[in-house]
Image (tube, rainbow, N blue to C red):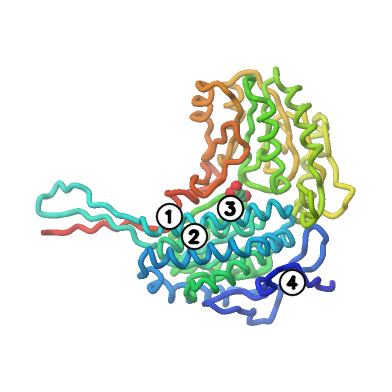
């Protein structure tokens, strides 16, 4: 397939990179091998990116190891100044970064622009936090000794990041790591390496020292081999991964022999509850944002809707009207609010979930099929009369399908909502303050959105319980992942 040149779409064409980034230099695979990156909206070939392997993974770890002492020994303020410069450059180049993201990932340009700002916010936030790392000196129980607690950078870190948020899932991991004084090796998803490489170019321009950030690009097969190498490396002290629970378990097992610290942001199956006292218009607006953001390809997207039986019909009627306003198409075109699914396998999973639900008695309210646009476009879909035996109520769909069930009591809906191996995000709408407290406390989820469908920002701790993962990203807690506590017992 002929490669389409996308550089003319950028104000700064030099942000388009196809080589990996190791030790401050652009890097081709030793084999000369490359892999293809396609635009999911058009199927066009837009890049041939260097296909690295375990050998280059080791080089990147060595580069990060060599850079570690120098970076760690800078003051928090020195690190903050460089990170702030990087943030400013990202902000100045936001339009180009958004275009690259839409071209490789498919999300509408307005959403991509939002992700660039969201992704940059982690760099700004953690640049500020870099200056505030503090240990403690607890009161002693030994009069001849003092207890000192220091916080120190953990060392070389690895970030393995997903295709659905090609920029924000990188910055949410590497900004706290860098602020803490750690150096990093990043393995972006093979479907979306261009955003990561553009970020590296801007980091270079910001003066971030060589080896502090390294980016390994690889196709699916080489990514597995690289992952094994990174997990096995005794030099790597921390691994952060965002992706499926299935892959998270594998990485956890692979990291066991070297006892690495892990941060895992894994799958979710978010319940979205509409109580009988909810503001229905607000619930509809929140449902649309939560469900159809990024074509439903977000770990915190609402996956199953529980609507009180007394407001079910009113909710469904208004929800269906709102969903009809979603405009499906190529995210580069003006006015588009839902892009394609990332790849054919994603489309097939959505089709399988819808077919299974319909075969077991669900009612189709809207959508329910591939878009007439072809490719991997799927119509925004609503199903009612959904029951718990349907795949869609317990497997992550990762697509634009809203399955709706009814409930009759608070107790029942909390039990249904908590009946999941996942525990990432949950949402509910109510105006009763007592009910709000009770439900927020009872939901077994790391995140609870009350009267809102959008919950993510840099000051909030993002993460899940149960099989949705370990650790928290963002917020004042996000840097703890990358800091070790050291206790110094000082005899006087
Ligand atoms: O799939 C998970 C991406 C998280 C997006 C967010 O931060 O809201």
Is 18 drawn above or below residue 341 in the view shown? Answer: below
Rendering quarter of residue 423: top right
Q: Residue at x 62, y 69 (%)?
A: 197
Q: Which residue is the site of mark 3? A: 118
Q: What is the crowding at mark 2: few (fewer than 14 residues within 10 Å), some, or many (at least 20)?
A: many
Q: CA distance from mark 4 to mark 1?
A: 36 Å
Q: Earlier in the sequence, mark 3 or mark 1?
A: 3
* Residue 417, horizontal then vertical, whole percent: 60, 31
Q: Is residue 110 left or right of residue 457?
A: right
Residue 94 is left or right of residue 83, and the answer is right
Q: Is residue 415 above or below residue 118?
A: above
Say which residue label 2 marks: 175
Label 4 Cα crowd, 10 Å radius (few <14 / some 14-19 / many 20+): some
Instruction: Look at discs 3 and 1 and give the one toward the viewer.
Output: 3
Which percent across, then down, holds residue 384?
77, 29
Q: Assess mark 3: CB under 8 A from ligand 1?
A: yes
Q: Earlier in the sequence, mark 4 or mark 1?
A: 4
Q: Earlier in the sequence, mark 1 or mark 2?
A: 2
* Residue 389 or residue 328, whichever sits in front: 328
Quadrant that contains the C terminus: bottom left
Badge 1 vs badge 2, beta-carbon distance below 8 Å? no
Q: Which residue is mark 1?
A: 479
Q: Quadrant of residue 178?
A: bottom left
Front-lying residue, 286 or 348: 286
Task: Tell me which numbered mark, 3 or 2, is placed earlier along the sequence.
Answer: 3
Observer-nearest of 461 and 446 = 461
Ligand 1 within 8 Å of the CB at mark 1: no
């Amino acid at each position: 397939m002929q490669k389409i040149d996308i550089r003319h779409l950028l104000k700064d064409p030099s942000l388009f990179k196809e080589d990996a980034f190791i030790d401050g230099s652009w890097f081709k695979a030793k084999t000369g091998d490359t892999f293809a990156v396609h635009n999911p909206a058009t199927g066009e070939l837009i890049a041939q990116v260097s296909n690295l392997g375990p050998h280059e993974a080791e080089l990147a770890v060595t580069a990060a190891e060599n850079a570690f002492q120098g970076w760690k020994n800078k003051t928090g303020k020195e690190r903050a100044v460089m990170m702030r410069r990087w943030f400013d450059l990202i902000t100045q180049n936001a339009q180009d970064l958004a275009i690259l993201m839409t071209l490789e990932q498919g999300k509408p340009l307005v959403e991509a622009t939002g992700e660039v700002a969201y992704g940059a916010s982690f760099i700004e936030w953690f640049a500020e936090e870099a200056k505030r790392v503090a240990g403690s000196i607890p009161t002693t129980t030994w009069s001849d000794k003092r207890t000192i607690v220091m916080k120190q950078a953990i060392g070389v870190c690895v970030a393995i990041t997903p295709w659905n948020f090609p920029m924000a899932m990188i910055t949410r991991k590497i900004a706290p790591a860098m602020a803490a004084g750690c150096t990093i090796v990043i393995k972006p998803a093979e479907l979306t390496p261009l955003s990561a490489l553009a970020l590296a170019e801007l980091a270079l321009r910001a003066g971030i020292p060589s080896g502090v950030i390294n980016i390994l690009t690889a196709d699916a097969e080489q990514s597995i081999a690289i992952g094994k190498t990174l997990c096995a490396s005794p030099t790597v002290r921390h691994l952060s991964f965002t992706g499926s629970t299935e892959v998270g378990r594998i990485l956890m097992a692979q990291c066991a022999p070297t006892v690495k610290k892990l941060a895992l942001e894994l799958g979710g199956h978010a319940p979205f509850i509409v109580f009988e006292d909810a503001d229905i218009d607000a619930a509809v607006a929140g449902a649309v944002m939560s469900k159809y953001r990024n074509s439903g390809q977000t770990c915190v997207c609402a996956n199953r809707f529980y609507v009180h039986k007394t407001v079910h019909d009113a909710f469904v009627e208004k929800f269906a009207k709102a969903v009809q306003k979603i405009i499906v198409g190529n995210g580069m075109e003006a006015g588009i609010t839902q892009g394609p699914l990332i790849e054919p396998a994603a489309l097939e999973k959505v089709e399988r979930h819808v077919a299974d639900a319909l075969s077991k008695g669900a009612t189709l309210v809207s959508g329910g099929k591939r878009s007439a646009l072809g490719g991997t476009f799927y119509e925004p879909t609503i199903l009612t009369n959904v029951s718990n035996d349907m795949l869609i109520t317990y497997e992550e769909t990762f697509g634009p399908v809203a399955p709706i069930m009814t409930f009759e009591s608070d107790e029942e809906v909390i039990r249904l909502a908590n009946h999941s191996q996942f525990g990432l995000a949950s949402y509910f709408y109510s105006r009763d303050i007592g009910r709000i407290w009770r439900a927020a406390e009872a939901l077994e989820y790391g995140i609870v959105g009350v009267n809102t469908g959008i919950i993510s920002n840099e000051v909030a701790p993002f993460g899940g319980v149960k099989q949705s993962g370990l650790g928290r990203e963002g917020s004042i807690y996000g840097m703890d992942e990358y800091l070790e506590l050291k206790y110094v017992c000082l005899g006087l």
